Image (cartoon, rainbow, N blue to C red):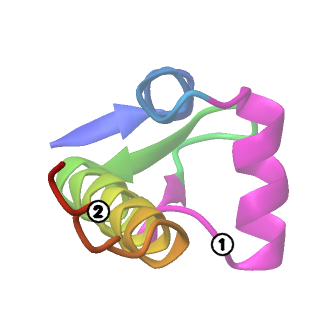
């Protein structure tokens, strides 16, 4: 199933202009195609894959930023 760029932008939390910029830069969800000069759609599976990858990246960054601290000795 294909999703319009406006819906993809809403799901990702960016503006449609950002999606356009990402398309020109080769970033963002892959597999998009233009139905017309003004309508761009993305495959649902690619949008889900992109969101999953972004979540995994965020989790890795959070883990790296907060190393485990040893417990304080109890008094």
The residue closer to the viewer here, 37 or 1, is: 1
Q: Which residue is mark 2?
A: 46
Q: Residue at x 45, y 43 (%)?
A: 41
Q: Is residue 52 magenta?
A: no
Q: Is residue 35 left or right of residue 74?
A: right
Q: Secondary structure at mark 2?
A: helix
Q: How dense is the environment of label 2, judged by Cα within 10 Å: few (below 14), some, or many (20 and up)?
A: some
Residue 75, placed above or below residue 67: above
* Upstream in sequence: badge 1 or badge 2: 1
Q: Secondary structure at mark 1?
A: loop
Q: Is residue 30 left or right of residue 73?
A: right
Q: Which residue is mark 1?
A: 27
Span of residues in magenta: 14-33
Q: Residue at x 34, y 63 (%)?
A: 59
Q: Residue 15, image x and y in percent? A: 73, 27
The answer to which image quadrant residue 22 occupies is bottom right
Q: Is residue 17 magenta?
A: yes
Q: Residue at x 48, y 60 (%)?
A: 32
The residue closer to the viewer here, 52 or 56, is: 56
Q: Residue 24, image x and y in percent? A: 82, 69
């Amino acid at each position: 199933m294909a999703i319009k760029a406006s819906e993809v932008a809403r799901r990702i939390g960016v503006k449609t202009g950002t999606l356009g910029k990402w398309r020109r830069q080769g970033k963002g969800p892959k597999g998009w195609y233009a139905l017309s000069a003004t309508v761009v759609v993305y495959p649902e599976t690619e949008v889900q894959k992109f969101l999953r990858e972004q979540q995994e990246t965020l989790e890795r960054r959070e883990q790296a930023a907060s190393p485990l601290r040893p417990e304080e000795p109890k008094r």
